[in-house]
Image (cartoon, rainbow, N blue to C red):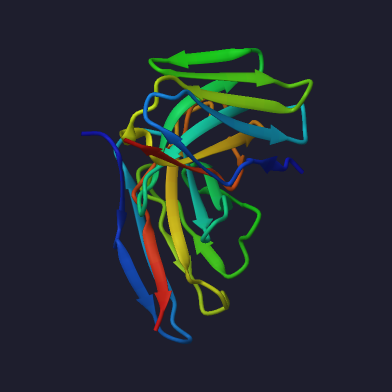
Amino acid sequence: DGGITQSPKYLFRKEGQNVTLSCEQNLNHDAMYWYRQDPGQGLRLIYYSQIVNDFQKGDIAEGYSVSREKKESFPLTVTSAQKNPTAFYLCASSGYTGFNQPQHFGDGTRLSIL
Amino acid sequence: KQEVTQIPAALSVPEGENLVLNCSFTDSAIYNLQWFRQDPGKGLTSLLLIQSSQREQTSGRLNASLDKSSGRSTLYIAASQPGDSATYLCAGGADSWGKLQFGAGTQVVVTP
């Protein structure tokens, strides 16, 4: 089955720690995205990537970093500089043209502070 | 910057009634408008995508319209069922990079 796999499902971060959220897709999609969702709010874009080895900041990139070394993988690191990391993180992908193809989402990672 | 609003934040309807969900956006230069469904604790499922050159899209019991001049999109769900209970989000495609601006969603409960 083609889809997007996010892991882990739940993650806990200690003070001063960096944590990495995994996102893998087997849809052969070029574009990948990371969003953050807070309770009662819509999704906000953290980073996005159209091709391998290239990525752009979204609306709330501070305190986060990404890499895109392979087409199918787009990991997100939540650094210690992100002071309010507790949220639901969603990864998405879409086909080549990006803007006129629907985005497909994983099932998310819920990050909490210990 | 595109801003997307969904009102109301929540609604409850009896089974069998038609659902009408509203989405408004501020920038009429929109590339597309997408509707998604989100079940509790899950990711989003794409329902319909309307390109900027289109006025509506249909899939089964779902129909979505787009009126760029008034900055509105409406999602209609015919003959609602309890399984339609979920949060529905709309998102405006603002540019060619595929970036989306999301509304906060409308939480729908369909009562048997």
Residue A27's quadrant in the figure? top left
Query: Residue B75: x, y in percent?
Result: 54, 25
Query: Residue placed at 40% from the left, 17% from the top?
Result: B61
Residue A7 visible in this rendered orientation of the protein: yes
Looking at the rendered image, the quarter that the N terminus of chain A falls into is: top left
Q: Nearer the viewer, residue A74 or B90?
A: B90
A16 is higher (above) or lower (below) than B52: below
- Indicate whether B108 appears above or below A109: above
In front of the other: B8 or A3: B8
Residue at point 49% right, 52% down? Answer: A34
Residue that sits furthest to the left in the current view = A1
Question: Horizontal and vertical percent for residue B41?
Answer: 36, 54
Relative vertical location of residue B20 with respect to residue A81 in this rendering, above or below: above
Q: Identify the residue shown where x is 54% and y is 66%.
A: A64
Q: Is residue B73 left or right of residue B48?
A: right
Q: Is residue B97 above or below residue A63?
A: above
Q: Quadrant of residue A83?
A: bottom right
- At horizontal 39% and vertical 26% (from top left) the residue drawn is B80
Front residue (pair A10, A41): A41
Q: Position of residue B19 (x, y in %)?
A: 49, 27
- The percent position of residue A60, horizontal first and vertical second, equals 63, 60
Q: Quadrant of the C terminus of chain A?
A: bottom left
Horizontal side of residue B54 vs A101, given as left or right:
right
